[in-house]
Image (tube, rainbow, N blue to C red):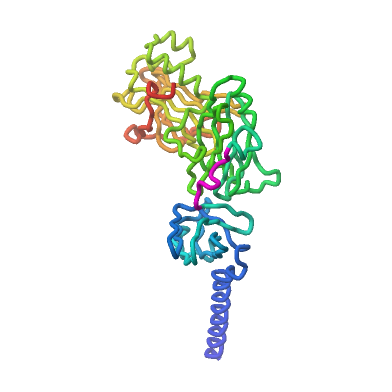
Amino acid sequence: MKKSILKTVSVILLVLAIIVSIIFLIGRYGWKLFGFTACETAGIEQVNVEKDHVRIRGFYPGSFPQGFLGYHAEQADHTLYVGFKFSTLFGIFETGDFDITIPTKGTVTQVVVRSGEHEYTVWPQEAEFFVNEAEATENGIYVRLERNDVYSVGWYFENKCGGMTNADGTALEGGKNIFLDTDVFYTASNLERPIPVMLVFSDKDGETIAHVNLSYDPESPVLTATLTADARIYVNGIEPEKLAVPVVYEPILKQYRSALEERWTGQQLVDAGLNFMIKDVPSEAVGYAVDDLDDDGVPELVIGTIAGDEFYGKLVFVFYTVDDDCEPVQIFSSIERDRYYYAGGVRFANLGSSAFDDSYVTTLKLEGEGLVDMTFTTDPEDYVQMQLVPIAEGDK
């Protein structure tokens, strides 16, 4: 009887194993039967076109890890079309990175990534990397997305803001030039000067994929910002070496620059609404950083010390974010008995005292336009020196 039961269990287990194996193999390789319909796009890092083959290096561009299953390729005349497949379940033993070599026949002059929904050129990139003025139907800003996980593009300039999303909540289409805004052209033309513009690219959850601060010149009215698969941004085909200051923060930094260069008094700083503690610090030791610390699509402005003693070292003078009306909002400003230090990530340490024998130390976390007490302390040895740019060397 026991042998019969064991035999039955063994058979059942064997059948289940065969079924699971068949399902896995179908999921792992069966997609190839559907060609490009089952394919996805990918983050492309490098394309090398040789006489008899094309080598492509890339990765899965989404935020949730998926393993690389393979590719499907077809060559039509001098164009090579290629699509990729990733899966969390069936690619469990693989990473999302890939380095493939595709055999080709004859000369290849173009490599195109094709999926069931999108198609765009990845080599040569210059062919469609940005919109020429002769091709443009509108003056203003265009965006080009070389990935499929961008759900919104926000813009900010001259205290104006707006954005682009699909009404049905789907991702914005990749591989094509999308017209974003023309107001920037009229604004810059009326002012008769270039104006700074901030663009923010966000995913389905509203988290920032990348952001760029650029200058829009009405004398060159067509501007294209291209977001690549590896989250780099090119402006008219060129990767900016230095990002401009977001427009909403420019007036603040200009005031601090003047205060440092002219060595304003404490009263002058207070009257201007600036942090008066900078008067006790050498000008070259005061810097700023613009970064989206909490990944909410809104870069924050930090002004602090680049170097200093035990009291001033790693000190954050003032911290700003931007509200829904595109206006800068001050989250905190240090004073001698209520100082803030950066503690890494979205955390700040707050040291203060109301009297010589009544002091406090707490750790705060950035949430939206405020700070939340994390109910624990951070040792001063764990304070983090932020990478700051000297204000005196900023854009003037």
Residue at 50%, 59% in the rendered image = 108
Is residue 16 positioned above or below 71 on the image? Answer: below
Quarter-of-image position of residue 27: bottom right
Is residue 192 positioned above or below 1 on the image? Answer: above
Quarter-of-image position of residue 158: top right
The location of residue 15, given as percent across then percent down, is 57, 81
- Report the magenta stretch's main SS: loop
> In which quadrant will I find the N terminus?
bottom right
Asked if residue 127 is among those painted magenta in the image, a careful observer would answer: yes
Residue most extreme to the left: 309
Residue at 55%, 60% in the rendered image = 81
Asked if residue 286 is among those painted magenta in the image, a careful observer would answer: no
Instruction: State which region is magenta.
Output: 123-132
The location of residue 393, given as percent across then percent down, is 38, 23
Is residue 166 positioned above or below 282 on the image? Answer: below
The location of residue 225, given as percent across then percent down, is 54, 39
Q: Nearer the viewer, residue 7 or 292?
A: 292
The answer to whether one can see residue 82 in this image is no
Left or right for 95, reference 12: left
The answer to whether one can see residue 307 in this image is yes
Q: Nearer the viewer, residue 140 or 311?
A: 140
Q: Nearer the viewer, residue 308 or 7?
A: 308
> In which quadrant will I find the C terminus?
top left
Number of marks in the image?
0
Q: Nearer the viewer, residue 347 or 249?
A: 249
Residue most extreme to the right: 167
Quarter-of-image position of residue 51: bottom left
